Structures are given as structure tokens and as C-alpha cells.
Amino acid sequence: MFKFFTNKDWFLWSWIGGFMILLSTWYQVQLDVKINEWFGEFYDTLQKALAKPGSVTLDEFIGYLWSFAGVAGLWIVISIITGYFVAHWLFRWRTAMVNYYHSMWDYAKDVEGASQRVQEDTIKFSRIMESLGVGFLDSVMTLFAFLPILYGLSKKVTELPWIGQVDHALIWVAIIAALGGTALLAAVGFKLPGIEYDLQKEEAAYRKELVLGEDSDEHMKPPTIAELFGRVRYIHFKSYFHYLYFNACKWSYFQFMVIVPYLALAPTIVTGAVTLGFVQQITRAFGRVEGSLQFLVRSWSTIVELISVWKRLREFEKQLNIPRGLDLKAN
């Protein structure tokens, strides 16, 4: 799976291309920081204009909108270019995997489900990594960029409801809430990777029998085909049940987190110690930090699918039984 990074033929794409993705993601995060600063200034101006008519000119107000359009437009362009490059980068990764499997086909062809591993699982792997990998990079960089911002803004928030005085209160609220949510969903969803793996395994066995049935009617007769589909149905129903309570916990947690920053800011807001721009800026920074810390929570279903694909490809490679010297040569 990782020969893309060890094969010298793919050096430029794997390492230099990866660095370019890293650099582009970092620049997008810096633009997001500028947008966060704009929110603070804009809403303070909005509050000033509403509180004292005539204190803000039309040109000043329109100027703020134009400045946002410039930064946001640049963010959109970089995002589109990055997405395009990432798609090509990951297809090269898939190509490296597929080329290796093709070169080892004399050993692979006798492995059950080999064609599905080479065709379907490699494309699933690349598509999942396209969203999950870039999402992880963005989360890490966003955390490093916005954590100091939230720390600085939290100096004005020194009290939490029902708790009292807490220095840099929103930092602690974001960390505790995100880690608590991650632990909760990891606990209720720990069975999902195994279920997803079994689901794909049963589907593969059923699909293979259907393919064989195209050449021989014997494979389409009961009890073989009926038994295989019965297993498929069982594992699907099992999956539906486990996702039922997992999704109930996940969406309840996400909806609760919408009000958490405002709840934490309540004593500061009701005393009038902060402006509207400050509230917008700090809640947005809180959302960025919290969202970064919640990467596992928000991506759990995708991670489950990735683990399943990775396990199938790893098992496939173990079953190849390639002589060691030949394997090194293929690298």
C-alpha cells in the first residue's frame, strides 16, 4: 500500500507533491485566520453603525465587504487548485499500488477476491484518503493557528457559569468538550470497524458467486446463493442497528456543542464586558479549535471504512506469498 513512498520512481509525486499539499493547506489556514480577524472588525463596525447612526459611512461599510471578498476569493481559488492537485496525487498513489499488484499477478490471481482488491479497494482507498488525509492536515494546522488566537481572546473570559473564575476559560471548555466527545463516540462506535470489514467480506463472497454464475448455473442455485445473500442481509441489519445508537450519540453531541461557546460566554456577555465583534471572533476561533480537536469524532464513519479497506488490502498482500527477493525487486 505504501510503495508510493518507497519506490524511487514516484519520489517527485510522493514527497515533493506531498510537500506542496502541506504548503497549500497551511496557506489556506492562514487565510482563514485573516477571515476570523475580519469578523471581529466587521461586527464591531456593525454594532457601532446600529448604535449610533451616521458613525460609519457607506464607503467604509462597503470597504469591509470588498476586503472580505478579496480574502475569501483567494481562499476559494487556492482550495479549488489544491483539491485538483490532491486528486491527481492520490491517483498516482493508486497507480503505484495497482502497478505493484499487476507485477505480482501470478501470485495474486489465486487469492480469493483478488480482482476486487486490485480494482475496487484501491479506488476506495484513494477516495477515502482524499477527504480524510487532507482533512487531517487541515485540522492539525488549524489547531496550531487558532489555539494561540483563542488563548489570547480568552483573557477577557475569566468566568464560567456554575463554576466561577477560570483563566482562559474557553480553551479548557474546547479541549474538555472535544476530548469528551471523542471518548464518547469511540466507546459507542468501537465495534463498527469490525462490522464494516465483515460486511465487505460477505459482499465479496456473494459477488464472486454471482460472477461465477455467469458461466455456470450451478452457482446460482439454492442453497449456495441464498445462504450467501442471507449472510449479507444479516451483516447489513447488524450494521444498521449499531449505526442507530452511534448516530444518535453523534448528532446529539454535535447539536449540544452549538450552544456550548455561548453558554461559556454567558457571564461575560450579560455584563456587557465585550463587543459583538469580539463575540463573533472568539466563537469562530472556538469553533475552529473545537472542530480540529473533533477530527476523530467528525470523521469516525470514514475512518471505519478506511480501516476496513486497509485490513482487506493488508490481508491480500499477506496472502500473495511472494518470494522475498522478488518482492524487493518489485519495490
Image (spheres, rainbow, N blue to C red):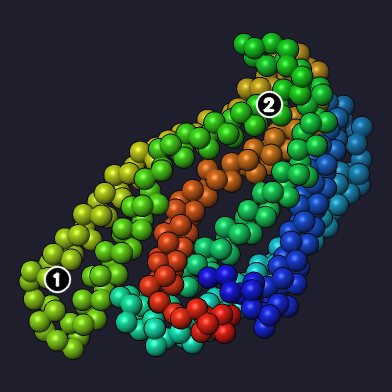
* Residue under the point 53% across and 82% down: 325
Q: Is 129 left, or right, of 314 in this rendering?
A: right
| Above or below for 219 versus 71 | below
Tag 1: amino acid: Ile
Q: Is mark 1 in CB contact (under 8 Å) with mark 2?
A: no
Instruction: Give residue 245's position: percent from left, percent from top.
Output: 35, 38
**In the structure shown, which secondary structural element does the residue marked by tag 2 occupy?**
helix
Could you classify mark 1 by the number of other residues whose Cα lies within 10 Å: few (under 14), some (14-19), or many (20 or more)? some
Q: Quadrant of the C terminus?
A: bottom right
Q: Nearer the viewer, residue 249 or 4?
A: 4
Q: Is 138 left, or right, of 93 in this rendering?
A: right
Could you classify mark 2 by the number of other residues whose Cα lies within 10 Å: few (under 14), some (14-19), or many (20 or more)? some
The residue that mark 1 highlights is 225
Q: Nearer the viewer, residue 219 or 315?
A: 315
Residue 235 in sight here:
yes
* Residue under the point 42% across and 86% down: 105
| Above or below for 254 versus 29 | above
Tag 2: amino acid: Trp
Instruction: Give residue 300's position: percent from left, percent from top.
Output: 49, 48
**In the structure shown, which secondary structural element does the residue marked by tag 1 occupy?**
helix
* Residue under the point 40% across and 38% down: 188
Instruction: Give residue 306's position: percent from left, percent from top.
Output: 47, 59
| Above or below for 154 versus 40 | above
The residue that mark 2 highlights is 172
Q: Quadrant of residue 87?
A: bottom right
Residue that protrudes farthest toward the left in the picture: 222
